[in-house]
Image (cartoon, rainbow, N blue to C red):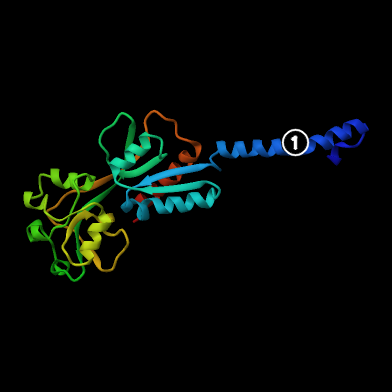
Amino acid sequence: VPAYSSGRSPLGLDFLNETAPLLRALDGSLARLRDHARGLRGALRIGATPSAITPLLAPAIAAFRAEHPEVILTLHDDVAETLAEMVADDRLDLAIAGRARTSPELVQTEIAADPFGLACAVDHPLAHSAQVHLADIDPRQLIHLGTGTGSSRLLATHPGLPEALKSGPLRCHSTIAQLCLVRAGLGVALLPRNAVMLFNDPQITFLPVADLVLERKLYCLRAAHRTASPVATKFEHHFRKRLARDAMAP
């Protein structure tokens, strides 16, 4: 205000003094509005299958938060079908997961591929094999995922997998439960590599299966008929930049 006092009438000075707080508040509101439009503030809701968090999402989240610390970021982990529903219903801005069932409400863009192999405890006899084949896996020891998951559907429909290995009496609701049983020595499981390495547990090992050619593909799920928010667009930029960097790494 003093900068404008020279040559002003007392009435004008009174007006400036009275309105200065209002003008400062208005200026602050406009600045916050500009920041929000640029994606510097606000909220971001991300969904992910658990096995995608550490290798794919965590580095992008770290880079994004370093640049935009005021954004409230919420991460929701679940199976692909649930995440797809949440994206379509505007409960999530985007999700990283296996492919969900085809829906006109979703755009699913492939971003990565994860090979299947065998998860077993480090003291399991197969853990010391030079090479593992499907015939080496005892169907009675196989721990399965529930039929509602993407991984279980991939295995069930894979023509190269023997029928005896597609289903069994021991099933789990989640990959975490599977890994807990594998760790406890109750059996083995066919899983994508990143799922097996979810916690880098030294008591669990991942073994490629020589005659199993199967990948779980990961997708970025976005709403088909809803414009992405500025903050979601910025995060997706960070995420794709990280993917490109990993693809170029030796």
In this orientation, which residue lies closer to the viewer: 64 or 184?
Answer: 184
- Tell me the amino acid under the disc marked 1: Leu
Judged left or right of residue 112, residue 2 is right
- Work out whether residue 83 or residue 129 is closer to the camera in this orientation and state it: 83
x then y, percent, for residue 162:
7, 50
Foreground: 111 or 101? 101
Question: Would you place residue 109 above or below residue 190 in this image?
Answer: above
Which residue is painted at 82% across and 36% down in the image?
18
Where's the N terminus, which quadrant?
A: top right
Horizontal placement of 57 versus 37: left or right?
left
Determine which residue is flagged by label 1.
22
Determine whether 247 is above or below 129 in the image.
above
Name the image quarter holding residue 100: top left
- Left/right placement of residue 17 relative to residue 170 reads right
- From the viewer's perspective, tell me whether residue 248 is left or right of residue 205: right
Position of residue 11 relative to residue 175, above or below, is above
- Residue 87, horizontal then vertical, whole percent: 37, 37
Q: Residue furthest bottom?
A: 123
* Residue 249 can be seen in this image: no
Quadrant (top left, top right, bottom left, bottom right) of the C terminus: bottom left
Residue found 37% across the figure and 51% down from its top? 56
Residue in the picture at 89% in, 37% down: 5
Count of picture labels: 1
Q: Secondary structure at mark 1?
A: helix
Q: Few, some or many C-alpha atoms within 10 Å of disc 1 (few <14, some 14-19, many ≥20)?
A: few
Residue 152 appears in the figure = yes
The picture places residue 102, in percent across and down from the top left corner, at 26, 33
Q: Quadrant of residue 193?
A: bottom left
The residue located at (59%, 40%) in the rendering is 35
Please tell me which residue lies in front, 140 or 191.
Answer: 140
